[in-house]
Amino acid sequence: MREAITMWKYTRMVVLVALTAAMYAAVLIPFKLLPIIPGITELRPANVFPVICSLMFGPAGAWGAAFGNLIGDLMGGTYGLGSYFGMIGNFLLGYIPYRLWRMLTSKEPGAWSPAMLARYLYVTLLASIACGVTVGWGLDILGLVPFHVLGPLISINNFVTAAILGPLLLPVLYKRVKQWGLLYHDVMDPADLSRGRLPHLAHVVMVLALFGSLYAGVSISLGLNEEAARTIPLLFGLEITAPESLLMPAGASVGMGLLPLMVLLVIACLLI
């Protein structure tokens, strides 16, 4: 994660932070009028920008996503304490894609083959879940929205948007940005780009932390740690009963229950 700090000494990287934040906020704000959960989240086609800007601008894309989301909340009338968890979640949405891409392949994104497209969807999925569980965890702690509603919703909202729009926008934009010499590895000195410590182990830890957080958060939030809540209603009058082995410890809260997994996520991001 060293480049997330060292990038600030490059004027062009700072400009790219501002550019990413401006694009992100400019598309976020109008869609505040189409809320999914009023005052909390909305339809967000803008979520494609953190992912594609991550692959083009690296750490500048991550910071731009964080600041762009905060600006969107400020200008869109949804600012509150939850906005700071939104900043962290959107930073991860813009940080994880380029770090994972660098670890998984030396090929540049944009020229889509089936393997490259699958890789793009994979890094997008993990980044989307990271944002979802971070924001869902934070807003559950604040008592604003239960995790089982917000965590999966943000994860799906992020992934679907970036999965549909990213493959269309990235090939066009990537070529232009490369021609202008604005790819993050062209702007920054290689000495300022960390290669990660134990990146493959960190990758495995990240996957376990993300899917573990999503599962555990939904389980605790739905009350599967309570005997009376073992039966989960589904659509059309159907229901399922959670087996005893899947129940969380009695009295567990989302905040404390997910804390160890969130710590593992942070460690994985530092090491990857």
Image (tube, rainbow, N blue to C red):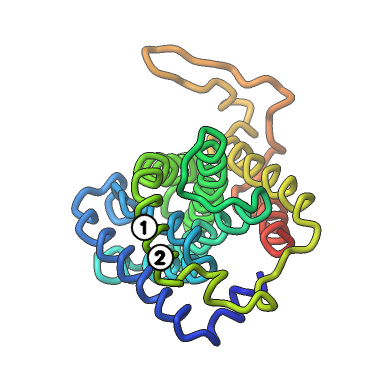
Q: Residue at x 61, y 31 (%)?
A: 224
Q: Position of residue 178 (x, y in %)?
A: 44, 64
Give the percent coordinates (x, y) of residue 107: 59, 51
Question: CB under 8 Å between callouts 1 and 2?
Answer: yes
Q: Nearer the viewer, residue 270 or 19?
A: 19
Name the mark on residue 173: 1
Q: CA distance from mark 1 to mark 2?
A: 6 Å
Quadrant of image for the C terminus: bottom right
Looking at the picture, how far across and down is residue 93, in whole percent?
A: 50, 56
Q: Quadrant of the rendered structure where residue 227 is?
A: top right
Residue 197's place in the image compared with 214, above or below, is below
Residue receiving disc 2? 177
Q: In the image, what residue occupies the spot 40% across and 65% down?
A: 177
For label 1, the crowd category at 10 Å Cα-Cα, with few meaning under 14, some 14 to 19 and many 20 or more, is: some
Above or below, 70 against 31 in this view is below
Secondary structure under the numbered disc 2 in the rendered image = helix
Quarter holding residue 32: bottom left
Task: Give, as a three-letter code, the residue at label 2.
Answer: Val
Q: Secondary structure at mark 1?
A: helix
In the rendered view, does 36 fall on the left or right side of 271?
left
Q: Residue furthest front?
A: 179
Given residues 59 and 65, the one toward you in this image is: 59
User: Residue 198: percent from the left, percent from the top?
Assistant: 80, 57
Between 233 and 191, the one nearer to me in the picture? 191
Quadrant location, the N terminus:
bottom right
Residue drawn at (50%, 58%) of the image? 55
Which amino acid, mark 1?
Leu
**Res. 15 mark:** none
Q: Is residue 97 left or right of residue 82?
A: right
Q: Which residue is rendered at x = 29% and y = 44% of the image?
A: 36
